[in-house]
Image (cartoon, rainbow, N blue to C red):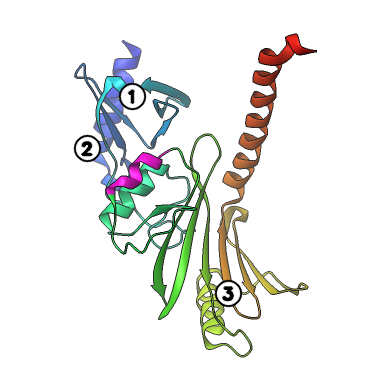
Amino acid sequence: MLKFLIIMLLSAACTLFSSTSCRADTLYLKNGNVIHSKTIWLDDGYYMYILYGATVGIAKDKVDRVEFDSETKKNDFQFDVWPFGCSVLQAIDIAERNDLPLHKQGIITVNKKFNPMIRKHSKATHFYYNTSLLGHFAKVELFFTAKTKRLYAVQIHWPNQKTNNSVLLNEIGSMISDQYGKPAKSGQKLFYDTTKWIAKDGNQIIMKAYSTAISLQYIHTKLTTLNDNEKQQLKVEKVKTGSTKDKGKF
């Protein structure tokens, strides 16, 4: 009864307040039930979602279809159409709506439009697409956390750019400063110069100027920490699995 009351109150809240505060992804189950959550992602054959603060999973074969929120609001810290924390499936959905030629990293292609075949790589954690930014060829890379597949970093790379007195380099730095304030730190490494901006919640933007290329990284600090923790968890799980399998050999 209490759970039913909570659901009714949430439904009423979505009616009273603007749609931006109640946006949600939706799972439509084969038994007719409908599940709403702020974010839904696919992990090892299960659709995962958040329910009352807990992470819950439901087998993929029990799901009829998934609808992702199409009204993605640009956050204070975000590059282009890519909201940090979105799942791989949400990112693929965004790529489809914007007709972006998203590909799994390592696959070389000249495709310039969205290809639905990308959905078979929903378990991957590294994607890219080629585009034109500020009038120059650029490669945009998306990085997702190791287990939960959440977007934690975006990197934009402009190759074949002479950075000595570069108009492009200065324009990038100027636009980032207009959005996030003056750089928090600048320095020189052996092979590149680096400039760093600190956004809200400690998120970072790092620009690296090589002699013949420019790199710009958007890094979500908390999600990056999550990725590090998940990588460590996977290492531990791998060792445990190997130990169970091979313990009789020692």
Q: Which amino acid does label 3 sit on?
A: Ile
Residue drawn at point x = 58 percent, y = 61 percent? 199
Q: Helix, strand or loop at disc 2?
A: helix
Mark 1 crowdedness (10 Å alpha carbons): few <14, some 14-19, many ≥20 = some
Find the residue positioned furthest to the front: 249
Q: What is the span of residues highlighted in magenta in the rendered image?
A: 116-122
Image height check: is 176 above or below 23?
below
User: Do we see residue 134 in this rendering?
Assistant: no
Q: Are the residues at dot 1 and dot 2 in contact (C-beta closer than 8 Å)?
A: no
Q: Identify the residue under disc 2.
A: 15
Instruction: Between label 1 and label 2, give the one nearer the viewer.
Output: 1
Q: Which percent across, then down, holds residue 83?
A: 43, 52
Who's the residue at 73% across and 74% down the image? 191
- Judge whether 245 appears above or below 235 on screen: above
Q: Residue 107 appears at what percent x and percent y?
A: 44, 53
**Magenta-colored stretch includes residue 118:** yes
Q: Name the residue under label 3.
A: 214
Place residue 244 in its image quadrant: top right
Residue 60: assigned label: 1
| Up-down relation of residue 161 to residue 147 (above or below) | below
Task: First in sequence, mark 1 or 2: give its number.
Answer: 2
Of helix, strand and loop, which mostly describes the magenta segment? helix
How many residues crowd mark 2 within 10 Å: few (<14), some (14–19), many (20+)? Answer: few
